[in-house]
Amino acid sequence: MTLQAERRKIMKTLGVEVLIYLQVERQIAKFLESGSLDGTVVECLMPGGNPHDFEGFVFDYKFFIQEDDKDLEAHIASLIRDIASFYNSMGGYLFAQFPMDVSGVRLALKKDLSDCDKINQLVSVYLGKNIGVRNLCGSAQFEGQKRDYVLFYIPKRPTTEKPRPFVKNSKNIGDAKSQKFILRKNDIYCRYEHECRSALDDVELLSFLFSDREFKVGSVISTKIENNLPPRDPNLIRFVGRREYIEALWQWICEPRRPIKVLTAAGGLGKTTIAYEFATEVLDRPGSGFEKIVWLSGKKITFAAILGRMVSTTRCDFENVDELLDNLLLEIGSPLDTIEEAVDREEKISLCIEAFSSFSILLVVDDVDSLPREEQNNLYSVISQIIIASNVTNDNSRVLFTSRLELLTGSEQRILMKGFEGEDFDDYLDVNVNYLLEDERQAKSVKKHKNRIKDASAGSPIFITSIIRLVSLGHDLGKAVSDWRGKNGEQIRAFAFEREIDQLTPIQREILYAMQLLSRARVNEIEEICDLTSLEVETELSALKDYHLYATKGDPVSGTVLEVPEPIRLMHDVTRSKLPDDRRRLIERACLEAKNDNADPARYIAITISQTVAHWKNQQYEVAENYLTEEIQKNGKIGEFYCLRGRTRLSISNRKHEQIESDFEQAEKYGCNPFDLLKYWFLLKFRDRDWRGLYRLHKRKKDMAEAFPVFNCIRVMASVRIGDKILSKTPKDAKKYYEEAIELSYDYINSGKALGYFHHFRSLMGEAAFKCLEAIGEDGSRKQPELERFRFVVLCLNYGLAPTHLVRAGLRSLEKWLVNVAPKAEISRQRSSILDDLDKLIGYLERQESVRVSLSSECSRLRTLL
């Protein structure tokens, strides 16, 4: 037999051992999907009468072979905790085993577990619902002895149902002073890889529970949640810290009969940023049960202290309660004629109640305090009336307000925010320093004096960023910090802005002033208003963007537009004072004419979306396609319309990939909402298994894509699938793709870019690791593939990747190398490094919560072969 043939034989034998875990998980998943509860499931869990030496995401063992000191209630509570964990996660099987001659507590426990009605009754007591647990009782030969068993089938919680917390405490197993409960009221449990854990104080686990929780890695894209979220704040470099607020909002979603929450804090502490981050996380996790996310901003006027008066904003979704109701109804899909026929407020409220009762909606009302005080309370009262009335029939809808004031809320309805503190402050400072300061000496100075910045900024993200921006413009840090003390948010923003304005050329100031007055401007409008050529505007805009004074965004009607952040828009008088009077007057007149010529784009796009969605609901996709084509012919630079048409064509079977791809390219060109565009663009390529296309798309749109875990998960999947396609031809290149998938998954998990998709990433890591072992075996250029496989498994410890089946595969490879392949001289040469690797593996196993004794023993046995 040739060496290559021998290697293939070894790899084939090893492959059977390697894949046993995946086969068991996949087989159990199939049983769960079909609702199986019979001897085939028992045989899968106890092959040949012996349990597997590993547990999984969807199965667990309970062996009541020996007596212990737990009483019956404690055993039952532990079982209900595990049942709740499986139910909240992906469902699963619990296999309980008893001796034939059982007595005492174990006998009582076996009788209770055998009574399915009693178990469901107890589960209902603690979860508030009969979740439909089923059991199978029997006896068989296990490990050479006849024993009784009870096999439980726990269904998976429906996607439309929120995670189930415990509604009451179990028996106190502590004492009066130090109470301890196995089941604690309001706690939420989930299955986390091979164990059951509380998710209440872990935002990663909460995010997982609100995801689709599909076992298959391929089910990572969802198109269920419609939304009107604005583009991400261009000044937000990266969302840092603040996880306690995000966690509190996820917990709020689980709370029954508490549909309202208010994020409240002083200006500049990031209320809107946190609300937006939470909304995007919900958008990325259809398991939350929401069918629609509606974002409405009430910012109408704000006080600019440097100007000494109230100034008007240029973007406002509503100015009063009636306008809010009109826009809310439009966003949730009410026909325009129905809204116009509702002549008074009560009729509009009734329509809203009907919608919130029928659909699960997350409504975010941002910047409530920008309205006059009496309007704020009026608005809060009306929205409360709607959500409380609809809550009677639909407890899934929620309303999140952001406000400096606490409105008419109780303490349980408020989340009081503070500035950055501790590690969060350090992380946020580092992100800004790395982004804004190129000079290493400046960066070191800022980090060295970080406490001065912390004191001056009070932890406000806006203030921190602005101080560092001042330093980037050449301002002395000590003077900047001292000047900032005692100033409020508006004064500080103006102070920072004026420093930036002084750095601009006269032409750049004119362009900025025009954008401030218009708020949203097309490039050709700026050319006309400022009397510049397209080349001149392009050159000056490039310089302005370096100062982060504007961003390119998608406008529903005008296509790609230029927009300046709200704080900069409010400081237009500062720019005005820097311009010659004659040029200022010309620009002001031209901007006024441009404003008068522009219709309300937001309302136009909302009406078009509403009509398109109506066609979708009636399954009239070709009608929707024709309708959108007509609108595109009327207004050829509407990015959102191209995206809508691409989405529509995804539902029409005979539409070619190239047609839809072209729509998405045009949507990108004309500034469609980046998240919506990417989601459906990824969906197109995912549907057509265009893995290289997905790989390149994520790389091209990395800045946007990496903000959303779902896109990162698909990116990793693309690497694995590309490796699969080239494995047989170029195993060396395939191995690189698999290794990239492992490294990326690890980085995404540890950087918070995997929230809600932890299981998918871990599954992909495991799959990529096994494929790496196969690639090593297929690569004929490798001299010692068996030893390399073992060392690769040891390398996986660096990524926290050491499931029982993978470790065993590595140990089997090492043994085959020692016994069948390697010359004694080579073994002697490698002995020291192999011993180090085995010790590293033993140390890792012994640090785990559940020591895998058999694997540690196997490592020790192999040491004797050296």
Image (cartoon, grey):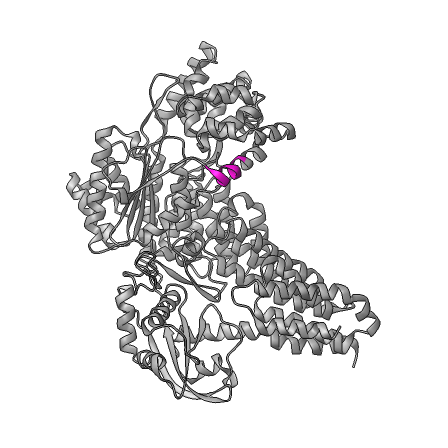
Image position of 41 (left or right of 427): left
- Predominant SS along the magenta part: helix
* Residue 474: quarter of image: top right
Residue placed furthest toward the right: 825
Quarter-of-image position of residue 414: top left
Q: Position of residue 497 (x, y in %)?
A: 48, 22
How many numbered badges does the structure rendering display?
0
Q: Is residue 724 visible?
A: no
Magenta-drawn segment: 421-429
* Residue 584 image offset from top left, x and y in percent: 44, 14
Nearer to the camera, 235 or 130? 130
Q: Is residue 414 above or below residue 659?
A: above
- Residue located at (57% from left, 55% from top): 746
Residue 123 in view (yes/no): yes
Q: Is residue 854 left or right of residue 75?
A: right
- Front position in the image: 83 or 450: 450
Q: Is residue 231 magenta?
A: no
Residue 850 to residue 306: above or below: below
Location of residue 759 in the rendering, given as x and y in whole percent from the top left corner: 49, 61
| In-front residue for pair 82/544 | 82
Residue at figure coordinates x 26%, y 64% from the top left: 128
Q: Is residue 390 above or below residue 49?
A: above
Quadrant for the N terminus in the image: bottom right
> From this viewpoint, which residue is outermost toward the top?
581
- 148 up-or-down from 292: above or below: below
Looking at the rendered image, the quarter that the C terminus falls into is: bottom right
Q: Position of residue 785 (x, y in %)?
A: 73, 69
